[in-house]
Image (cartoon, coloured by chain):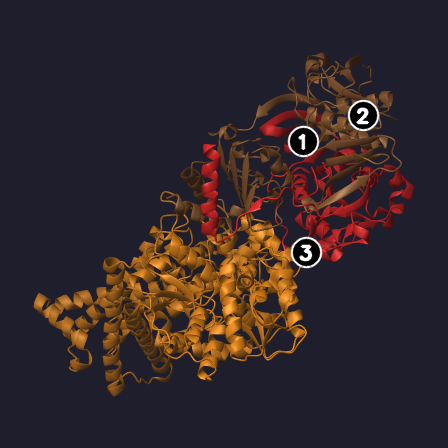
Chain colours: A orange, B red, C brown
Amino acid sequence: MLAALAAEKTRPVLWHMSTGLEVLWYFLAVASVLVFAYGVARPVAKYRRGRAIWLPPRSELWPRFKDGTKTLFAHSSIARRDPLAGWAHRGTFYGFLVLFIGTVILAIDTDVVHRIFGASYFKGNFYLVYSIVLDVMGLALVGGLAILMVRRGILRPRKLDYARPDREPGEEQYDRRVYRVGDWVFLGVLITIALTGYLLEGVRVAEDNPGYNAWSPIGWVFAQLYDALGIGQSGLSDIRHGIWWFHGLLAITFVAAIPFTKAVHMLTSYAGLVLKDPLAGKRLRPIPPELASEPAGYATIADFSIGHLLQLDACTKCGRCHEVCPANATGRPLSPRDVVLELREQANASMEDVGIGGVLGTLMHGSNGGSDRPVIGEHAVHVDTLWSCMQCNACVEICPVGIEQAPIINQLRRHLIEEGELDSNLQSTLQVIHKSGNSFGENRRRRGRWTEELDFDVKDARTEPVELLWFVGDYASFDPRSQQVTRALAEILHGAGVDFGILFDAERNAGNDVRRVGEEGLFEALAEHNVAQLQECEFSRILTSDPHSLNTLRNEYPDYGGDWEVVHHTSLLLELIDAGRLDIDGRLSYRVTYHDPCYLGRHNGGYDAPREVLRRLGCTLVEMPRNRDNSFCCGAGGGRIWIPDTPGAERPSENRIREAVSVGPLDLFVVTCPKDVTMFEDAIKTSGHDGDLRLAELTELVQEALVAG
Amino acid sequence: MRIVVPVKQVAVVDEDFELVDGGSAVDPDFLEWSLNEWDEFSVEAALQMGDEVIVVTVGEEEATEGLLACLAKGADRALRIWDPALEGADALAVARVLAAAVGRESPDLVLCGVQSSDAVNSATGIGLAAHLDLPHLAVARAISADGDSLTVERELEGGLIEVVRVGLPALLTVQTGINEPRYANLRAIKQAREKPLEVLDLAGLGLSESDVDAARGSRLRKLAVPEAGEGAEMLQGSPAEVATRIREIVAERLSA
Amino acid sequence: MSGVLVVAEARRGELREVTLELIGAAKGLGQGPLSVAVVDHDPSRFADRLALDGVDAVLAVKTPGEHFEPHVAQSALEGLIAAEQPSLVLLAHSIDSLGFAPAVAARGGLGFASDVTRIWWEDGPVVGRSAYGGKLEAELDFPGRDTVLLLLRGGTFEPAEPGGAAPAWREVAVELREPRSEHVEFREVEAGDVDITKADFLLSVGRGIEDKDNVEQFEELAERLGATLSVSRPLVDAGWVPGARQVGQSGKTVKPKVYLALGISGAVQHLAGMRGADTIIAVNTDPEAPIFSVAHYGAVADLFDVAEQLEQQSG
């Protein structure tokens, strides 16, 4: 309908068409719309089989709609880290949108204004502007599509490699031919529609010679082409009908097929953007009260939230999450994209089980009893795929359409925990955390032992009011290497006269990683305990030197009654430096690189404070290629630090050290997370770079600077 | 198959403990409680083999947690027995009390752990079998059921295995490593409170204090911190220094 | 009630060493006549071995079955106790004894203690044994019990020496019960590639190594040091290492020149398998680890740090 009618319309719409053909045309157009409608009804029915939980309140819908539309029109999420794709898609998107609107304008004029009121606005200056705009935007469409085709066919970026890491070649589900071919067909059909539109315009300009060709420049070019090919007037007449019908049928077929092909992303991705959870991954969802006696997590498609089911369809296979995933990069059988696609296939298969009757039934009556199809299994999502995830949120963060890959994986893990399908080391660790409140199996009484080597007493926040309640965290309290950092921070705070205290024995593991493992019950127990303890204390702010604790204290504890301001030690250090209480300016001159920890950076936006502290110290910061929101996870998160690695495979932390070494000569690899301290101290050695690089935690550098002063 | 699994909540003594009662008991403040490691394996074996699994324990309130974990894993019912008269009961006294509880369930199979990690008597299971007059085998590392009988692999000293057959009903004591105990997630443990958990005292089992006294095998006179022995010569210094010293000792001793 | 009855232990036609330790312990008590019971298909084959200093009598009970059967053994011992009325009955704290001795004590209402490491007399037997998983020592006595049955820990008491007058031999007729289980066969645990009992230098690791894939690292370290790698039970239970490498009561008993234990806490069953080594060096982060009580040299340190240093220094 697009370029076709628009180009044709200067003029009679359905040019020289017999009444019979006109009726046929309208019949087909209506049929196309009906098929489209059914195509939309089917996924709607599919989504309704899910659970109506975690949906945004109605009051948010309008602001979300505005925000989503803004993001879409700016293409900010699509252009991130891939400007070429950004521009190509802008061309395609705006081209298609304008041509689509143009068609609607034309249809309204023809079938409503003209048929009913006998008038027409499709003429004169209006028409001229219309004509040039559509001509140019059609070019944008063709150009955009052409770039996308070159990108896919010639440039072949890794993210467009559809091979899945969780299947072997030869297995029935390994071959992604259906997707690959489908994507090419999509591009091909769309560009054909656009080009045939131009072809048709060219015929019209050549045959009718309307005289204002400046307003149909591309058409004019094609007209010259016909002329050059020696196609005379009679020839033009012959092909005009043919091109018209070809273009028209292709177009309405395309429209009808939208919900059944990749083109559906026009609807579902948009919906994904509108329904996007800004806290996805930062704040995982508690089990809804109405499901308290149900098993936790997603076992079958019927367990999924409506939002998640819709997100499965929003995926366009752009591959950004596939490219950015640290598990994927180190050869693990996980790609967030492939988890989403596998689940989508499971959801679609469950609809097939149900058939057309079921679809209509579900639309009318709501959930049709749910499909029993399990989503985890040998021919579905693999268990070791799910356990490979580090819950670093890189996938969620980069997804242009708001899919929550990591939270969905977390929901599947909740089910695995219900079933007891977990690595035995992880099982022991969870039991140990439950018993002793920390992952080290140390007696709770020893939590404050690290303070004994200080030459001052640390206040007990349980018994005295403090300004800052320092929630220390497991690793910072018990791991010998991290204890050095913890003591350094205590000494700095004490020296700067900061009023702080700790919870000593009453502090338990904050639960961030326990939750990400899927042990929701244990997380609740830990959170409830910590919240109760904190509520007994008097303090203004919570300080933490552990990004994992930071994340859960700040973003998740409010769901459990704990709502306090939580600050990371890097921000506090900067505050103190800015206030002149720490004299460190320009004292060190190291050449350093800085690794953004996932839970401080990506999850909580804490990119700048550490960098500013390094700058004030006088260090020269050389950024690694993957920095800030694109930081590459050390591999400890999501409980992975409690699960043994596959021997022989490259560890994410080693991958990261190699990246650091590649930026040139460096003195230090700076970190601001206790788990990073552990992972990278180890990786520097195991990757053989302990002559090239030394690890330092930011606090240790501040202390060094203070001592030097 | 109905299987009864007697379990024990064991005490782990904290590093800096103190003795009370004139040195005959550890100050309870320094005790941490958890389900006996061997019982994780016997419970798992029961869940895999049985249609109905009942767990029984002799213990105070802290034993409830262990029972809930077993219920969360899939046991059908739990029973906790306690009575002030059971304070300081030894393995044979416990066996006598368990016999009354287990007997009334008429099980097809009773699975016990070989030993408990705190008392390490390795006697309660077989003592229980004697009171119930059940055929019994100790230290099973593998069990397979075949209709009305079991084929059991007993783990003997020095890596030797004995394969033995026994008919049901029977009692076996189960060794660690026989299976992979499943995980009891905390939600399941919470939900397990809905499952039947009975608490009985001696009277509830039809036993009297003198029954328990008659069954007692020993009396605890006193507890003491063990001497350090001849004492290992402790190597001091950094890991590097320790390593150097170790290599010296090794070289010296191997050439001797 | 008087006298001490020692129950000999045999397997596959061999008298087990621990029997001599029981006799040595009984002799040490000096509490009246010492009889040794041999419950076996062919008791006389052990006559020579039992000509030991301190043994006054050997009581032979003939069993119809060739192999140990707990219910038969139980009835044999019950019968012997009824006939002889000893004040003290000693057995080894062994797998077979555990299969029936508690039953005898339970049914007979006897005094009972297992895994006994010390024994003395104060108007009745008093014993010492471990408590709270080895953290403490307990002293037990048996008021009101005329007969006390004890299981003694192997490798703890001095074995009796050959010598003295040949003991009187007596066949005792005891009403034996029908067996309630049936021996099928014996089997060795998978032999594996290595015989750790032959090694001079064993590098032994335990739960402290944390990850399955660290096993390889320690295998390499062992090789570099010229040692053979052995392990404690948990690693075999977890399936990380074949049973042939296990040191302990249910594994192998080893007596190398040097036993270097990294990250092994020293559970009793493990100590039983290696305490005979000439030189024991133990590294563990827990200063209270029981292994330090048998080690000759110890270090409270992180085993990975020490291992790394050993690796570097041997490179």
Q: What residue type is labelled 1?
A: Gly
Q: Which mark is residue C154?
A: 1
Task: Find the distance from the CA under tag 2 to the CA under tag 1.
Answer: 18 Å
**Labels 3 and 2 positioned on one and the same chain:** no
Residue that badge 3 annotates: B16
Residue B73 location, x and y as percent? 66, 48
Q: Do the residues labelled 2 and 1 touch (CB within 8 Å)?
A: no
Q: What element carries label 1?
A: loop
Q: Is residue C32 above or below residue B99?
A: above
Q: Which amino acid does label 3 sit on?
A: Asp
In terms of depth relative to the viewer, which is nearer, C188 or C152? C152
Residue that badge 2 annotates: C4
Using residue A166 as the reference point, say whether residue A515 is left or right of it.
right
Q: What element carries label 2?
A: strand
Using residue C147 as the reference point, say whether residue A623 is left or right of it.
left
Q: Counting residues from the N terminus, which is met first, the one under dot 2 or under dot 1?
A: 2
**What residue sits 47% from the left and 51% below the top?**
B239
Answer yes or no: is residue A646 visible.
no
**What residue sits 56% from the left and 43% below the top?**
C264
Residue A64 location, x and y as percent? 47, 77
Classify the position of the N terminus of chain A by image quarter: bottom left
**What residue sits 43% from the left and 48% below the top?**
C309
Q: Quadrant of residue B99?
A: top right
Q: In which quarter of the image is residue A450?
A: bottom right
Chain at tag 1: C
Classify the position of the C terminus of chain A by image quarter: bottom left
Q: Which mark is residue C43?
A: none
Residue A586 location, x and y as percent? 36, 78
Q: What residue type is labelled 2?
A: Val
**Labels 2 and 1 positioned on one and the same chain:** yes
